[in-house]
Image (cartoon, rainbow, N blue to C red):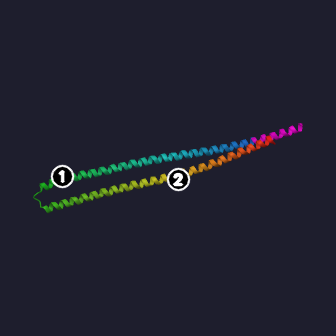
C-alpha cells in the first residue's frame, strides 16, 4: 500500500512539474501575444496619425483652393473696374476729340479692345493654370488617401487572421491542459 502511495505521489509530482512547465510556456506565449498586440496598437495609432495628417492636408488644400478662387475673383473685379474706368476715359476722350476723324477713333478703340481681349485671355489662362494646379494637388491627395485606405484594409485583414490564429492556439492549449488534467484525475 505504501509503495502504491509513493508511486501515486511520484506521478502526482511529475504531473505537477509538467503542469508548471506548461503554465510557464503558456505565460511566455501570452507575453509574446501581448507584445504583438502592443505593436499592433502602436501601428494602429500610427495609421490614425497618418489619417489625421491627411485630413489636415485636405483642409489646407481646401483653404488654398478658396484663396486661389478669391484671388481670381479679385483679379476679375479689378479687370472689370479697369475696363469700366478705361471705358469712361475713352468716352471722355472721344467727346474731347470730336475734331479727330472717326477712323482714328475707331483704330484706337480697336487697339484698346484688342489689348483688353489679350488681358482677359491672359487672366483666363492664369485661371485655368490655377485650376489645373489645384486639380493636380487634389489628385495627389486622393492617391495618398487611397494608399492609406488600402494599407488600413490590409492591416485590418492581418489583424483578423492573427486574432483567429490566436484564438485557435488558446483553444488548443486549453483543451490540452483539460485533457492532461482529466487524464491525471481519471487515470
Q: Position of residue 166 (x, y in %)?
A: 65, 47
Q: Residue at x 66, y 43 (%)?
A: 31
Mark 1 highlights which residue? 88
The image quadrant of residue 19 is: top right
Q: Residue furthest left?
A: 99
Q: Which residues are magenta?
A: 1-19
Which residue is at 24% across, 50% downward?
A: 81
Residue 14: image location, x then y, percent: 80, 41
Quadrant of residue 91 in the image? Answer: bottom left
**Residue 6 belongs to magenta span:** yes
Q: Secondary structure at mark 1?
A: helix
Our reading of the magenta stretch's main secondary structure is: helix
Label 1 vs 2, first from the N-terminus: 1
Give the number of the mark in front: 1 or 2.
2
Q: Is residue 121 left or right of residue 110?
A: right
How packed is label 1: few (under 14 Cα within 10 Å), some, or many (20 or more)? few
Residue at 81%, 39% (x, y): give it.
12
Kindly check if marks 1 and 2 are in contact, taking CB atoms under 8 A apart as contact.
no
Q: CA distance from mark 1 to mark 2?
A: 60 Å
Task: Please state the horizontal and vertical placement of residue 117, each as a whole percent of the image.
Answer: 25, 59
Judged from the image, the secondary structure of the residue bearing numbered disc 2 is helix
Magenta stretch encompasses residue 158:
no
The quadrant of the image that shows the C terminus is top right
Mark carried by residue 166:
none
Relative to the observer, which residue lies in front, 174 or 114?
174
Q: Which residue is mark 2?
A: 150
Q: Residue furthest top?
A: 2
- Residue 60 placement (x, y as % from top left): 41, 47
Disc 2: CA contacts within 10 A as few (<14), some (14-19) or many (>=20) = few
Amino acid at each position: 500500500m505504501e509503495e502504491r502511495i509513493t508511486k501515486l505521489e511520484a506521478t502526482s509530482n511529475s504531473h505537477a512539474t509538467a503542469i508548471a512547465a506548461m503554465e510557464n510556456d503558456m505565460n511566455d506565449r501570452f507575453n509574446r501575444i501581448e507584445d504583438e498586440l502592443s505593436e499592433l496598437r502602436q501601428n494602429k495609432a500610427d495609421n490614425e496619425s497618418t489619417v489625421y495628417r491627411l485630413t489636415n492636408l485636405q483642409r489646407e488644400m481646401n483653404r488654398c483652393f478658396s484663396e486661389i478662387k478669391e484671388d481670381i475673383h479679385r483679379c476679375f473685379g479689378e479687370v472689370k473696374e479697369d475696363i469700366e474706368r478705361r471705358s469712361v476715359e475713352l468716352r471722355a476722350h472721344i467727346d474731347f476729340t470730336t475734331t479727330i476723324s472717326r477712323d482714328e477713333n475707331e483704330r484706337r478703340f480697336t487697339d484698346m479692345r484688342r489689348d483688353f481681349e489679350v488681358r482677359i485671355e491672359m487672366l483666363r489662362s492664369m485661371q485655368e493654370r490655377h485650376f489645373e494646379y489645384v486639380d493636380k494637388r487634389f489628385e495627389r491627395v486622393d492617391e495618398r488617401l487611397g494608399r492609406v485606405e488600402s494599407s488600413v484594409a490590409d492591416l485590418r485583414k492581418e489583424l483578423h487572421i492573427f486574432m483567429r490564429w490566436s484564438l485557435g492556439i488558446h483553444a488548443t492549449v486549453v483543451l490540452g491542459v483539460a485533457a492532461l488534467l482529466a487524464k491525471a484525475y481519471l487515470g
